[in-house]
Amino acid sequence: MHIVQLLPNITYGDAISNDARAIQKILRRWDPDTAIYAEDIAPLAKGDAQKAECMPQLAPQDVVIYHGSTGTPLNDKLPQMGGRKVMIYHNITPPAFFGPYSPPTADSAQRGLDGIKRLADHVDYCIAVSEFNRQDLLRMGYTCPIDVCPVLIPFSDYETPPDAALLKQYEGDGIKTLLFVGRVVPNKKQEDIIRAFYFYHKYYEPKSRLILVGSWVGMDAYHERLCAYVGRLGLQGSVFLAGHLMFDAILAWYRLADAFVCMSEHEGFCVPLVEAMYFDVPVFAYNSTAIPDTLGGSGVLLPEKDPAVAAACIDKVLRDPALRKSILAGQRRRLADFSYDKVGARMEALLGAFLGESPL
């Protein structure tokens, strides 16, 4: 039996790419020659995968594990591939978010959703990375068995040294740091984070800054509107759209952060929430899509988008040591559910049950 993974693209630091690499280690227990294939391979990931067109024809007993996450020709090619088919579903952002800013991205998202829907009768088994994603598949008509297993997060990577210069520049300067990490795209709703920060900065803590880490490649129009919004609110010098950062710089900002604020309206899992838990940063997140699944009762789940309420919540937690301690204790308990060994064992058990075999 040969087992392969197939995904649209593989890169460095991406959650789906990291998940595929981690799963590969598990698959080697059944197939020492297991491989990853991708349509696009980033330069830093060239040793991790082979081009999708090089994937061999699979025999009936073989298995292809497909990571469903975007609009790609692979959605239409998968039914013609041999072997049994497993899909790990990471979700696809609804195209309506992208329409006003990037019609091509909206078209790609629509093709992705349509492609995933067409696969409903061609997949033997699904693993959704959140309960929200499982429900999404059911809404699209999937009738095969569907289980839930979070993404595998390589926490050991977070122990690498942070950017020392960044820490030296900002550590201990007495300014409260609010942080969000994620692509600058409309579904992440960075404007709502900026709005909440405006209230926090004006009415509670003028010695504060907001750091928005993430690339806006392909979303220049959205980025320009965010910058203009920062200007209209008079927050220049307090709100920083940092763009794409090296990993050590991201680690530094997590260590510098006093609060992690997420106002996203569409997430299939949201790894940065777990990263914030790992760095003991209190999480404040809007209650949408997979966010409550990921928080699992921890952090501060905001039921509405009222920026004044969000700012008041942030200030209350940051000024009340006992409350902050209680929230962090809850986050640590939830973080244990995402331990690499625990999630890896569940993934191994689920795949083993589907394969009907024990590891080598």
Image (cartoon, helix red, strand yellow):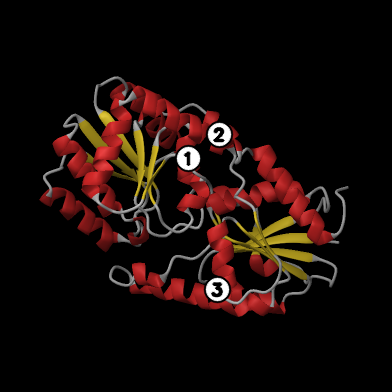
Residue 7 screen position, x and y as percent: 61, 62
The amino acid type of the residue labelled 3 equals: Arg
**Residue at the (49%, 55%) spot, across then down:** 290
> Can the viewer see residue 217?
yes
Residue 255 screen position, x and y as percent: 41, 28
The amino acid type of the residue labelled 1 equals: Ser
Identify residue for label 1: 298
Which is more toward the observer, 290 or 61? 290
The mark found on residue 333 in the picture is 2
Residue 296 screen position, x and y as percent: 52, 45
Residue 295 screen position, x and y as percent: 49, 45
- State the CA–CA distance, disc 2 to disc 3: 31 Å
**Residue at the (40%, 34%) spot, across then down:** 282
Identify residue for label 3: 139
Quarter of the picture holding the N terminus: bottom right
Which is more toward the observer, 2 or 139? 139
